[in-house]
Amino acid sequence: MLHCWRKVTQRTEASPVHQSSDQPQTIALINQKGGVGKTTSTVNLGAALAQCGHKTLLIDLDAQAHLTLHLGIDAGQLDQTVYNLMTDDEINADDVIQSVNNMLDVLPAHVNLAGVETELAPLMVTGTAQRVLKNKLETLAQGGKRPYDYVLIDCPPSLGLLTINALTLARHIIVPMQAHFLALQGLSQLLETVQLVNRSFNPDLLVTGIALCMHENQTLLAQEVMADLRSFIESAADDDVPWRHAKVLEPAVRRNIKLAECPSFGKTIFDYEPQCRGAEDYRQLAQSLIDAVHRIDNPGLQKSPPQIKIVTQSPPLPASQKVGTV
């Protein structure tokens, strides 16, 4: 199934990886195919990280603004969104960031984000357009007013300029996907784009993990796809490609109706139904993400970070700090 990926691998000595300890771990969740659980995973992994004590920022880079809506925020009631951040030199990140709770913030999106590529088109020749988000968020990596441990980016379901901005900013990539044949084939183009950004704008960019969503492990197709996926990843371990360190993160997130219901209430799964199997899967997946990032950025250390302990509810915001709800 993965024969189309082979053409982008090159057999060379793997390059070293580097990560400054004073920077937030910036992770892009990306898949050009829609409906694979990307936004759900960004929201609930971010909520899991926040509930275990990691200050976390979620960035909504999708003009559909589904992550923003998932968190109960009505972008139409906001003065500034990520569109303004990327197109107005006078706007900085602190003007746009909204607090969800004491440990979780969000850079919200609005439908007008669809026009950002047209706005930034004149800057593409110089390479400035591809670095707008990175330049705007530099203070986050320098321990500014809002120091973060993790920054998670919900990328649009395309490989356009917004996605390039996310990959230029990010250190790690997580690919949410379903265990379907066509989903595997789409990864070929995605990995080619990742390799292009790695070589041109961001040499530290790595594919850290694959997160399986809406999973039905009992089907023969799912088992075959997972076996093929693991085989491909293992075969790239000695290649100088950005996915040489990738792992299939455990557990696969099982199909769960509660995960589909909670966005309509503007809640994460931990606030909506913290004891359901969807919450349990994302709780464990967050630990796998922490472990994977730790393994890559601390190759000389054998000890894993402490196991996460998540409370069942986020600390509420004072009423004066709450944003508009849908």
Image: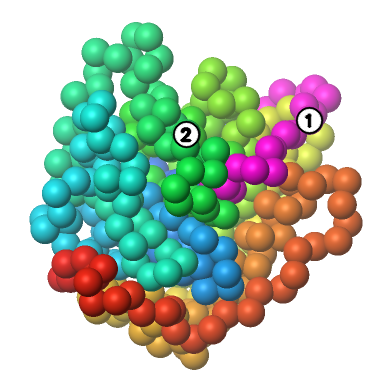
| Residue at screen point 43% across, 79% down | 314
| Residue at screen point 64% across, 47% down | 208
Residue 14 shown in magenta:
yes
Q: Quadrant of the C terminus?
A: bottom left
Mark 1 Cα-neighbour bin, 10 Å: few <14, some 14–19, many ≥20: few
The relative height of residue 261 versus residue 82 in the rendered view (above or below) is: below
Position of residue 276 measured from the top left corner of the image (x, y, whole percent): 47, 88
Per the image, the residue denoted by label 2 is 138
Q: Which stretch appears magenta?
A: 9-26
Of residues 45 and 103, the one nearer the viewer is 103
Of residues 322 and 254, the one nearer the viewer is 322
Mark 2 Cα-neighbour bin, 10 Å: few <14, some 14–19, many ≥20: some
Position of residue 255 measured from the top left corner of the image (x, y, whole percent): 45, 76
Query: In this rendering, would 241 be left or right of 269?
Result: right
Which amino acid is tagged 2? Glu
Residue 16 badge: 1
- Main SS category, magenta section: loop
Query: In this rendering, would 86 be left or right of 202?
Result: left
Q: Nearer the viewer, mark 2 or mark 1?
A: 2
| Residue at screen point 83% across, 25% down | 13
Q: Secondary structure at mark 1?
A: loop
Of residues 200 and 73, the one nearer the viewer is 73
For the question of whether residue 246 can be seen, the reply is: yes
Query: In this rendering, would 171 be left or right of 112?
Result: right
Q: Secondary structure at mark 2?
A: helix
Q: How is the image coloured?
A: rainbow
Position of residue 120 measured from the top left corner of the image (x, y, whole percent): 25, 22
Q: Residue at the top extreme?
A: 125
Say whether disc 2 or disc 1 marks the residue closer to the N-terminus.
Answer: 1
